[in-house]
C-alpha cells in the first residue's frame, strides 16, 4: 500500500475513534445531567411544599451542582409546588441540556419493616452483618434478611429507581462470571439537621421497587421497604452495596454511614 493510502487509512481510523469517544462522552454526560435535572426538580418541589426550609430554586441549584451540572432555569408554581428546571453540563463536544419537572405526590402507603433509632435513622437491611467495609469511597456491603427487603435509612424522596447507566466495572472485567447485567439502584434524598444527603441501594432486583409501590418522585419513610436485594450489576451474591453521600449519585460516596446508622 502506498504512503498516501496508508496515511488516508490512518486518518480514517482516527476519525472513527474520535467519533466513538465523542458518542460515549455525550451519553455519559447526558445520563448524569438527566439525573441532576430530576433531582433538582424534586428538590425544588419539596422545598416549595414545605419539606425543606431552603429556597426552592436555591436548593435545586445546589442539588444540580452536587451532580456536576449547572441549573440554567428554575420555575416553581407556589400554588401547586410544581417545579420545572433545566440543567446543563458542558463536554468537549458541546453542551448537554435536560429538562425535568416534579410535583408533590400523595403520601405513600408505606411498608414499614425497619425500625428507626432515636435519631430517626433506620438500618437499611434486614441483617446487621457487614460483608465488606469501606470500598469505592465510603460504600459498605450489607447482608440481607430472609425476605431480602431493603429499607429507606431516613425519611426522604426517591430521586432515581432503576438502572444507573454505569458500565462494566473493572472487578467484573477481571471476573466475567460476576457480571449480571446493568446495575439497578434506588437513590434517595434526605434532609437532616440542615444537611442534604443521598443514600442508595445497589444490586437490587429489577422492578422490585415498583412491586413495593415505590417509584421516582415518591416520598418514603425511615424503615420503609424500597427494594429487594437482587443480583443486578457486578456481584458474586445477593447483598446491598449501600452508600451515603453529599452528591446525588451512587458512585464513590463521601459520608461515613455509621455516623448516622450507628454501628452494626
Image (tube, rainbow, N blue to C red):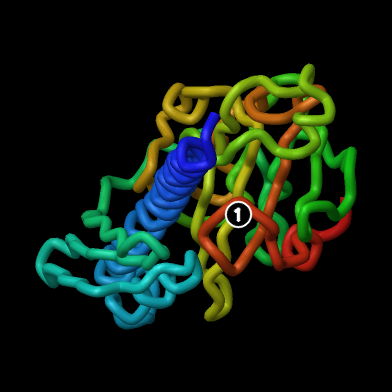
**Quarter location, residue 233:** top right
Q: Residue at x 61, y 30 (%)?
A: 204
Relative placement, left or right, of 130 versus 207 is right
* SS under mark 1: strand
Camera sees residue 159? no
Q: Position of residue 84 (x, y in %)?
A: 19, 62
Task: Report the number of discs.
Answer: 1
Label 1 belongs to which residue? 199
Q: Identify which residue, 67 or 79, lies in the foreground.
A: 67
Q: Quadrant of residue 197?
A: bottom right
The quarter of the image holding the N terminus is: top right
Camera-nearest residue between 105 and 63: 63
- The reply to whether residue 32 is visible in this rendering is yes
Residue drawn 34% across the image and 54% down it: 38
Splitting the image into 4 quarters, where does residue 201 fall?
top right
- As drawn, the residue found furthest toward the front would be 2
Q: Residues within 10 Å of mark 1 (few under 14, many from 20)?
A: many
Q: Determine the residue positioned at 39% across, 73% down.
A: 52
- Location of residue 120 with respect to 149 vertically, above or below: below
Up-down relation of residue 254 to residue 170 (above or below): below
Q: Residue at x 51, y 52 (%)?
A: 188
Q: Position of residue 164 (x, y in %)?
A: 52, 40
Residue 238, percent across and down? 76, 24
Q: Residue furthest top?
A: 177
User: Residue 152: where, in percent of width, then height?
Assistant: 58, 46
Amino acid at each position: 500500500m502506498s504512503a498516501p493510502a496508508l496515511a488516508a487509512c490512518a486518518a480514517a481510523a482516527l476519525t472513527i475513534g474520535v467519533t466513538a469517544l465523542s458518542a460515549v462522552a455525550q451519553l455519559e454526560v447526558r445520563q448524569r445531567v438527566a439525573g441532576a435535572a430530576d433531582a433538582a426538580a424534586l428538590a425544588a418541589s419539596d422545598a416549595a411544599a414545605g419539606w425543606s426550609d431552603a429556597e426552592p430554586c436555591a436548593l435545586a441549584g445546589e442539588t444540580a451542582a452536587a451532580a456536576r451540572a449547572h441549573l440554567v432555569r428554575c420555575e416553581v408554581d407556589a400554588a401547586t409546588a410544581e417545579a420545572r428546571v433545566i440543567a446543563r453540563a458542558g463536554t468537549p463536544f458541546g453542551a448537554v441540556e435536560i429538562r425535568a419537572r416534579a410535583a408533590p405526590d400523595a403520601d405513600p402507603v408505606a411498608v414499614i419493616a425497619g425500625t428507626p433509632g432515636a435519631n430517626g435513622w433506620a438500618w437499611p437491611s434486614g441483617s446487621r452483618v457487614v460483608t465488606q467495609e469501606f470500598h469505592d469511597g465510603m460504600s459498605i456491603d450489607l447482608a440481607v434478611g430472609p425476605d431480602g427487603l431493603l429499607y429507606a435509612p431516613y425519611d426522604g424522596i426517591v430521586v432515581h429507581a432503576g438502572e444507573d447507566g454505569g458500565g462494566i466495572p473493572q472487578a467484573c472485567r477481571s471476573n466475567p462470571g460476576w457480571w449480571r447485567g446493568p446495575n439497578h439502584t434506588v437513590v434517595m434524598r434526605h434532609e437532616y439537621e440542615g444537611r442534604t444527603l443521598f443514600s442508595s441501594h445497589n444490586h437490587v432486583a429489577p422492578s422490585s421497587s415498583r412491586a413495593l409501590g415505590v417509584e421516582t418522585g415518591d416520598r418514603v419513610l425511615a424503615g420503609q421497604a424500597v427494594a429487594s436485594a437482587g443480583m443486578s450489576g457486578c456481584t458474586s451474591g445477593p447483598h446491598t452495596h449501600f452508600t451515603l453521600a453529599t452528591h446525588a449519585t451512587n458512585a464513590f460516596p463521601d459520608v461515613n454511614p455509621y455516623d448516622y446508622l450507628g454501628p452494626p
